[in-house]
Every structure is written in C-alpha cells, then in structure tokens.
C-alpha cells in the first residue's frame, strides 16, 4: 500500500477557516476517490450533545462528515472541552488531564487504511495542549507536514512568517500556505496585496488561495472551492 498523504493543519489565528479548508480538502479527496481520515485531537468551546439532535454541532462533526468517516466521534475528537479556551487552560479548569497517549491511540485508529490523513489543530501552532506539549510538538511527534491556513487580513504577513519560522526551527516541513478569504466584501489594500507579498517573501513555498464559501456545510461547494483554489496539488501521491 502506498504511504498515505498526511497533514497537520494549523492556522495563523482562530476563526480564519482551518476547519473549512480541512473539510474542503477532505471533500475534494473523496471526489477523487481517495479514502480519507480526519481528526481534531482536542476541541474546546463545545457542549457535548448528540449530533442527531443538533446537526453539525462542532468542528469535529464537520470533519467526520467531510471525511465520510464511520469512526465514533470520540475517536475523531478524543477530548472535548466546554470552555472556548486553549486546551491546556480549558482542561485545567475542567479538572481534566490530557493524555497524549490517548491521542496517539486515536490517530492510529483513524488512519488505518486511509490514503489521506488530516489532523486539525486549534488556533495557532504554539497553542498549548499541556504545559509541556503544544500543537507543534504534537505534529513533530506524529511526523506531520504542515498546512498553514492564513486568514487574508492586515497582519497576516507577520503571522505567517512567525509560524513558518517556528516550524522550520523544529524541522517540520510546511507543505503549503493557504490564504483564505474571510468574507465576500470588497477587498482592502492589505487583502489585495497579501498573496503577492507572501509569494515574494516565501519564494520556495507553495502559496494557495481559498475563496469565500457561504455554505460551509455544503460538501459539494467545499470540494469545488478546493479544486478552484488549486488544492489538488496537496492530494498528489508525490506530495512531500
């Protein structure tokens, strides 16, 4: 069996489209006939309820649907925390200890027989999971190349460069940077120039654009957006 295509998806911030891009990539991979596994190791800001009662109630629900997964939600998302805080803080306040071995076991389970494995972090790359483990540490542990989702807004150049340098310092390859449209309004000067600036500043990296999608739970629309944004390059077996 060919080695699976595996990515850790991180972001420049919260609320910049990580889940949308991850779901779009999963949906597009399925259109191309690939078997997909998707995981969000820890999700905070969620009150756990039956999905059947509330639809796609969380990011993990959306990932599971986009991947067409039959895995239990408890495997796709091993830890769920009610307060919308960094996992370390939310877990401490809930008197819960996050065990990385539990995350290891969940990853091993979901990626069996998968051709594409997508692991979505929370917030940015250095968000703490515990006092000693960040998402960067987790991606190093799991040997996951990064997809960096960057919200197209003022300040993104600094955020991207900081994240790339942090990843490089730990020897983690950044497979691509995906610049996401955060709304459908007319672009500001910063939004209109950020893409070309990133190409200039990071000439050896793959820089992609992802359009605004007003129906983020429509898997057909997401797959089409992924195709239109050139994300197929991330689904080639030759991807590093």
Image (spheres, rainbow, N blue to C red):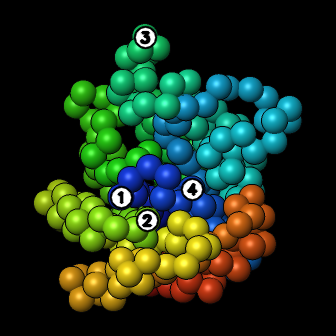
Secondary structure under the numbered disc 2 in the rendered image: strand
What's the residue at 48%, 58% (across, down)? 16
Q: Earlier in the sequence, mark 2 or mark 1?
A: 1
Q: CA distance from mark 1 to mark 3?
A: 28 Å
| Helix, strand or loop for disc 4 | helix
The residue at the point 38 percent across, 73 percent down is: 177
Q: Residue at x 43, y 23 (%)?
A: 90
**Residue placed farthest to the top in the image?**
95
Q: Are marks 2 and 1 in contact (CB under 8 Å)?
A: yes
Q: Secondary structure at mark 3?
A: loop
Q: Residue at x 31, y 28 (%)?
A: 130
Which residue is denoted by mark 3 in the rendering? 95
Q: Residues within 10 Å of mark 4 (few under 14, many from 20)?
A: many
Please tell me whether mark 1 sits on a helix, a strand or a loop.
loop
What distance separates the C-alpha of mark 4 from that of mark 2? 12 Å
Left or right of 49, for residue 14 = left
Marking on residue 12: 1
Q: Earlier in the sequence, mark 4 or mark 3?
A: 4
Q: How many marks?
A: 4
Marks 4/3: CA–CA distance? 27 Å
- Please give the residue where the numbered disc 4 appears in the rendered image: 19
Residue 151, numbered circle: 2
Q: Give the CA separation, mark 2 to mark 3.
A: 33 Å
Q: Earlier in the sequence, mark 4 or mark 1?
A: 1
Question: Earlier along the polypeptide chain: callout 1 or callout 3?
Answer: 1
Residue 144 to residue 40: above or below? below
> Which of the pair 86/116 is nearer the observer?
86
CB of mark 4 within 8 Å of CB of mark 3?
no
Location of residue 86 with respect to 28 vertically, above or below: above
Give the CA separation, mark 2 to mark 1. 7 Å
User: In the rendered image, is residue 155 in sight?
Assistant: yes
Quadrant hosting residue 53: top right
């Amino acid at each position: 069996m060919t080695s699976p295509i595996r990515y850790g998806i991180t972001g420049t911030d919260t609320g910049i489209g990580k889940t949308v891009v991850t779901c779009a990539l999963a949906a597009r991979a399925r259109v191309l006939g690939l078997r997909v596994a998707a995981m969000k190791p820890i999700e905070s800001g969620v009150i756990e309820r039956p999905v059947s009662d509330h639809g796609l109630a969380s990011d993990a629900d959306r990932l599971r649907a986009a991947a067409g997964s039959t895995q239990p939600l408890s495997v796709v998302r091993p830890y769920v925390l009610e307060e919308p805080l960094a996992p370390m803080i939310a877990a401490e306040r809930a008197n819960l200890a996050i065990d990385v071995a539990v995350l290891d076991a969940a990853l091993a389970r979901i990626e069996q027989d998968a051709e594409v494995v997508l692991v979505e972090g929370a917030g940015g790359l250095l968000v703490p999971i515990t006092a000693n483990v960040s998402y960067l540490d987790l991606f190093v542990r799991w040997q996951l190349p990064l997809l960096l989702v960057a919200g197209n807004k003022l300040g993104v150049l600094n955020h991207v460069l900081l994240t790339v340098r942090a990843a490089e310092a730990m020897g983690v390859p950044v497979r691509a940077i995906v610049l996401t449209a955060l709304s459908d309004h007319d672009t500001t000067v910063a939004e209109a120039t950020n893409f070309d600036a990133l190409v200039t500043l990071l000439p050896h990296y793959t820089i992609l654009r992802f359009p605004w999608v007003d129906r983020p739970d429509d898997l057909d629309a997401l797959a089409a957006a992924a195709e239109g944004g050139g994300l197929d390059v991330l689904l080639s077996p030759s991807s590093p």
